[in-house]
Each structure stands twice: as C-alpha cells, then as structure tokens.
Image: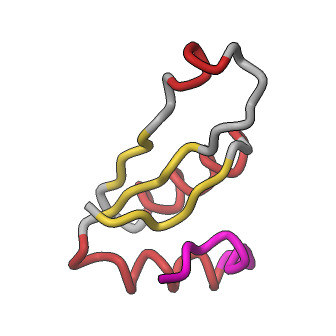
Amino acid sequence: MIELMRTNDAVLISFVEALMRDAEIACFVADQNMSIMEGSIGILGRRVMVDAEELERARQLLVDAGIEAEIKRD
C-alpha cells in the first residue's frame, strides 16, 4: 500500500475514508493507535494508505473534493 495522505485531523480522515468507500477504493488508516503511545496529544499524523493501482484515482477524488492540499507528494 502507498501513503495517500497524512494528518492528525480525525474528521478529515473520516471524510477521506467515506470518499474511498463510496468509490470502492480499499484504504487503510495506519498509526490510528499511536495516540496511546503519544499520550493522546495529537502530534503524530495518521496515514491513509491505498493500493498502488488505485493511487491516481484516489488522488483525483481528493482533488475533486477540494482537499488536494492534503495529498502526499513524492
């Protein structure tokens, strides 16, 4: 899987998960449980991961949703 975006904004992650689900693109949120390790202060970003084959389509969904600034650039 390839990192699509990284953020510590839980609402944004939920929105992106919904976009991916509606487009039938499998995604995985990595580092969700890191808040336990960091003491729940929110400094570690969570990563939204998608299959390499779906990366461009997933990026386009974020652009279409107006959140292209969140896309991880290589």
- Quadrant where the N terminus lies? bottom left
Q: Nearer the viewer, residue 62 or 70?
A: 70
Q: Position of residue 30 (x, y in %)?
A: 42, 41
Q: Position of residue 53 (x, y in %)?
A: 21, 78
Residue 66's place in the image compared with 19, above or below, is: below
Q: Where is residue 36 in the image (x, y as percent from the top left)?
A: 57, 13
Q: In which quarter of the image is residue 66?
A: bottom right
Q: In which quarter of the image is residue 69?
A: bottom right
29 left or right of 68 in image: left
Q: Which residue lies furthest to the right in this view?
A: 41
Q: Specify the principal SS of the magenta part.
A: loop
Q: Which of 2 and 21 is in front in this view?
A: 2
35 left or right of 22 in image: right
Q: Identify the residue at horizontal 67%, vertical 80% (top origin).
A: 68
Q: Give the range drawn in magenta.
A: 65-74
68 left or right of 71 in image: right
Q: Nearer the viewer, residue 43 or 51?
A: 43
Q: Identify the residue at horizontal 78%, vertical 23% (top origin).
A: 41
Instruction: Please say whether residue 28 is one of the residues in the magenta stretch.
Output: no
Q: Identify the residue at horizontal 61%, vertical 48% (top origin).
A: 13
64 left or right of 34 in image: right
Q: Which colour scheme is used?
A: secondary structure
Residue 52's place in the image compared with 16, above or below, is: below
Q: How many marks?
A: 0
Q: Quadrant of residue 50?
A: bottom left
Q: Where is residue 47 in the image (x, y as percent from the top left)?
A: 50, 50
